[in-house]
Amino acid sequence: MNRAKAEFFDTQVNEPWAASEFGEKETNKIKRMLRHGGLRPGSQVIEPGCGTGRLTGILADAVGPTGLVFACDISPDMVEAACCRVGSRDNVRIECMPVEDYRFDPESFDVVVCNNVFPHFDNKPRAVFHLASALKPSGRFVVFHFMSSAEINDLHRKADPSVINDLLPPEQEVREMFQAAGLQVELLEDDDDGYLLCSVRQ
């Protein structure tokens, strides 16, 4: 685990970006992500970097009582906040650990949703391959941000030293990374409406 990064995110747990409820603009972007992400009742979902659980509850509503959201984060304080927010739900499981270290059963999940976390993977190709291996054939892998890659990268370059190099790679690099993990990128939008990548496991 990257302890410096975990400690930084511990300090962010009460910041508006991490703790506040989503506004109308963000909610509309989430609805777009859910449409393209293929979440439905009964879906088994992995949510790395769940933070305080803001999105976790929405994912749990989307998959319903017969589905499951496996959420995790490296920040103990973020995980504590997520447990307080959504941990009592029967269809939510929350762990404090790097998702790269969790041993998933192969081909056991339907969807991976990486919201505001993808730049923070220290080894992005390894993380993508690990998560892709947990997806069923035709399972979907989504990378989702409320801002464009240019805005995200500019924000991180000005942030804490622990995340200053946590950037979204160029489009071609991302496509090659996902292809190497057996994922076909079906959609990649990177504009004023944010960053949305949707891919499917072959």
Image: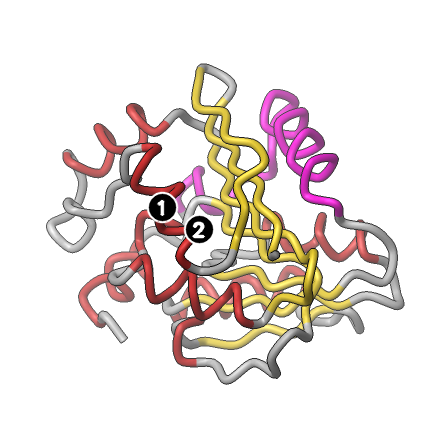
Bin the neighbour count of mark 2 within 10 Å (Cα to Cα): few under 14, some 14-19, many 20 and up.
some
Which residues fall within the magenta stretch? 15-38
Q: Nearer the viewer, residue 88 or 94?
A: 94
**With respect to residue 159, does 114 lie above or below?**
below
Please report the residue visible at 57 percent of the width from the left and 66 percent of the height from the top. Answer: 71
Please report the residue visible at 40 percent of the width from the left and 57 percent of the height from the top. Answer: 180
- Tag 2 near tag 1, CB within 8 Å: yes
Bin the neighbour count of mark 1 within 10 Å (Cα to Cα): few under 14, some 14-19, many 20 and up.
some
Q: Which label was assigned to residue 49?
A: none
Q: Which label was assigned to residue 176?
A: 1
Q: CA distance from mark 2 to mark 1?
A: 5 Å
The residue wearing badge 2 is 179
| Side of 132 relative to 27 (left or right) | left
Q: Amino acid at mark 1?
A: Glu
Q: Secondary structure at mark 1?
A: helix
| Side of 117 relative to 24 (left or right) | left
The main secondary structure of the magenta stretch is helix
| Side of 77 relative to 189 (left or right) | left
Q: Nearer the viewer, residue 171 or 14?
A: 171
Residue 138 in picture, x, y percent from top left: 70, 56
Please report the residue visible at 15 percent of the width from the left and 45 percent of the height from the top. Answer: 164
Residue 63 in picture, x, y percent from top left: 81, 56
Q: Amino acid at mark 2?
A: Gln
Q: Quadrant of the C terminus?
A: bottom right
Q: Secondary structure at mark 2?
A: helix
Toward the left, the furthest residue is: 161
Q: Quadrant of the N terminus?
A: bottom left
Please report the residue visible at 73 percent of the width from the left and 71 percent of the height from the top. Answer: 88
Residue 18 in picture, x, y percent from top left: 45, 46
Tell me if residue 109 is in the magenta stretch.
no
**With respect to residue 90, does 51 lie above or below?**
above
